[in-house]
Structure formats: C-alpha cells, structure tokens
Image (cartoon, helix red, strand yellow):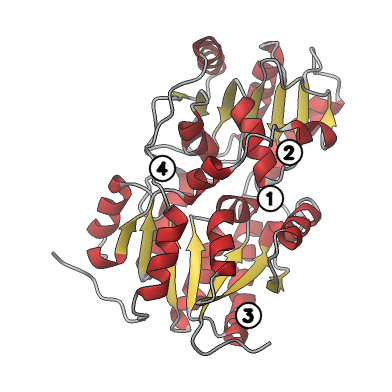
Amino acid sequence: MASSPNKRKICFPITSRVHYARQKQLLSLLNKDSRFELQVVAGGSVLSEKYGEMFANALLSDGFEVKDALYNLIDGGGHVAMAKTASLVALEFVNTLHKLNSDIVLIRGDRYEQLAIAMVAAYLNKTIAHIEGGDSTGTIDESVRHAITKLAHIHFVTNEDAKRRVIKMGENPKYVFNVGSPDVEFVATVPKSFDGSMVNKIGVGTDVDLNKDFVIVMYHPVTTESHNRKNTEALLEIVDKINVPAVWFWPNHDAGTNEIAKAIRVFRESGKIRNNKIRFVTDLLPEDFVGLLRRAKVLVGNSSAGIKECSYLGVPVVNIGSRQQGRLRGPNVLDADNDPKEIKQAITKQLKHGPYKRSDVYFKPDTSKNIVSVLSKFDLYTQKKFYES
C-alpha cells in the first residue's frame, strides 16, 4: 500500500535481538502514530534459526510488519565472518533503502551491522538518527559507536556525559538530545505479572526455583581479545562452585562467540557440572527477560543490561573485564578483571549485599515520546558540517 506523502518514512533496521527488545516502546509509538510510516527491516542474527522463530512471533503478535528481510549473516563466529557480514549488510541494504525510499534511518547502538547501514544511508543522502551515541565502552564497539555518530545527523543520547562527548566530536548541539535510555524506559513499563517463569519452559538444564536465590550470567565475546574460551571456562567453574542456581544466556553473535559456545557445550556435555544447578537458554522475549531480571539475586558477566537495566532495578551486578569499560554506571555495579579469585569474591560480596536502591542514571520519563516528538518536527538534512563552538 502506498504511503501518504505527508508521512515521514522511518526505517528501523533490527540486526540483533536487543534492538527489538530495548526499543519496543519507541517502535510501538512510531507504529501507531499517523505522522509516520514505520519500516522495520530485519537482518543479521535475528533471522538465524537460533533466534528467528521467537523474534518473528514477537513482531507478529505485537503488530509490526517487516518491510524487508536481509539474509546476510556469515556464520563462523570469527573476525573474518564478522567483517564479511558487515560487507553483505551494506551491499543488500542499498537495495532495501532504495526500494523503501525512507526519509529517516533510525539506528541504535554500536553493532557492526549498524555501521554498515549508516554508511549506506549516508551515501544515499538519507537523514540518519542515532540512539545511544557518545557512550564510552571497551572493545571495537567504542570505535563503531563514534563512527556512527560522525555519520548521523541527529543524536538521541542517554546521559549528559554522552551528550558532552558527541558535541566534542564536532556535532551541532541543537541536534543532540539527552532523552535517557529507551532500554530503561521499557523496563519501567513491564508489569510485575511477568515473573520470568518462562525461563523454565525453554532451554536446557535444571529448572530454577525463582522464589529462591539465583543468579543470571550474560557473558559475551570481547572481539579485541583472544581468551574468550579460557575466560568462559573459568567463569563456568566459578558459577558451578558458588552453589547458587544460575540462568546462563547464550552469547551474542560477534567474533569469539563460537569460542564461548564451545566452552559451554564441552562443560555441559562432559559431565563437569558438579551441582547441576545451571540452566542454559538462548533468549527470552523482552517482558519475560525483565521479569527474570527483576527477581535475580545478582547478574554476572559483561552485558550492558547489567549497566543499564539493572541500575534501574537495583539488581547487584558483577561486571567482568573490559567490554563495558568506561560506561557510566550506578552504585549497583562491582567491577572485576578476568581473574577467577577476584570474580568469585565479587559474586560473594554482591550475594551478601542484596538489592540496591533504584538509580536513575539512565532513566528519564517519556524517553520514547520525546524521541518521537523530535523525529516529527526537525528539518531533514543530509549535508553535515563540523561544528566548532
């Protein structure tokens, strides 16, 4: 069906499971607003067999239509596969964007696929809006995030430190908006009826009694380091020995993911699990994940969920290694190097501490509404200039 000439066509590429989960509130508002035509494009790991069925069902039940699907994931979990995937994303997204003729390409975060999409959008003279620019993090994600910032025309940052960095990179302050984190806003909207019990209906391993103490483990590859398997093996031993049930999420699809996955499989299938208290899951739908997170005693790993969502929920976090290095954090986060003794001590300390007070370091009311308001009003432009104050 042809779109109204008065509607702003907004393309939102989803290339990772977190893109949908963490922007669901924003996407719902855009989808229902008569001023916009929302163009959801799916690609990357969300179309893989591992995540695809759950993702497709969630989109359908939530009333979203996928305008195009990009089957461009090179499996292998290595640096070459990661680079080739980014190249294929760029190649295929040219056709998609040309066909959709979007007014705005709305990009989130620091994924390598999103950088490829930003490059294409810039060369096709499309206005690029970027969510979550300006954060300081570890690994290659830091470079990717800032590269997208330099291609983007409008910036929705999550905190004042990030706003300052974006402006320092030569971006015009009138196009930089501190709206807070859509991720945290979504957490605030999830009803308490979502209790996380879905975790015992999927995955493998022993059921977890959610009325008793349990931890969540979210440990992803660090693409600029070479000890992902060794570090995962050490973490598996630690989590098994603490004698507290655990829900362990599968790693995301970055270079190094196969090393982590192999460590998990060998540990699980070789009979090394002593206490048989770990449940391994691929993914949960957004509301179910928040329900589970809300009830967890501690989150262990290197996921941004520990930095952002857990800050609002007051969930104690043990953040391991360099992946989230430099990111703004609340008092609930205890950092540890990839040292088994240090990690174990940190987990023990957080288990004893219990819940923290809610932190609003990433929360602002009406985050999605404010983003929608800006997207509806600002003048579309494509020629950028370095801003010097």
Mark 1 and mark 3 lie on one chain; the one further toward the N terminus is 1
The residue under label 4 is: 363
In the displayed structure, would residue 156 be above or below residue 39?
above
Residue assigned mark 2: 261
Residue that mark 3 sits on: 96
Query: In what element is the residue under mark 1?
Result: loop
> Distance of mark 1 from mark 4, alpha carbons?
34 Å
- Residue 352 pos. (x, y %): 53, 9
The one nearer the camera, 54 or 291, is 291
The residue sitting at 46% across, 38% down in the picture is: 324
**Kind of residue sitting beneath label 2:** Ala
Q: Is residue 251 above or below residue 81?
A: above
Residue 310 visible, this orientation: yes
Q: Residues within 10 Å of mark 1 (few under 14, many from 20)?
A: many
Tell me how far mark 2 sits from mark 3, CA to CA.
Answer: 32 Å
**In terms of secondary structure, where does tag 2 sit?**
helix
Q: Residue at x 68, y 35 (%)?
A: 193
Indicate which disc residue 77 carries.
Answer: 1
N-term-proximal mark, 2 vs 3: 3
The x and y percentages for residue 361 are 37, 37
Query: Can you tell which quarter of the image residue 247 is in?
Result: top right
Front residue of 164/181: it is 181
Q: Is residue 304 above or below residue 84?
A: above
Q: Nearer the viewer, mark 1 or mark 3?
A: 3
N-terminal-most mark, 4 or 3: 3
Instruction: Give, as a three-letter code, the residue at label 3.
Output: Thr
Q: Position of residue 208 (x, y in %)?
A: 77, 22
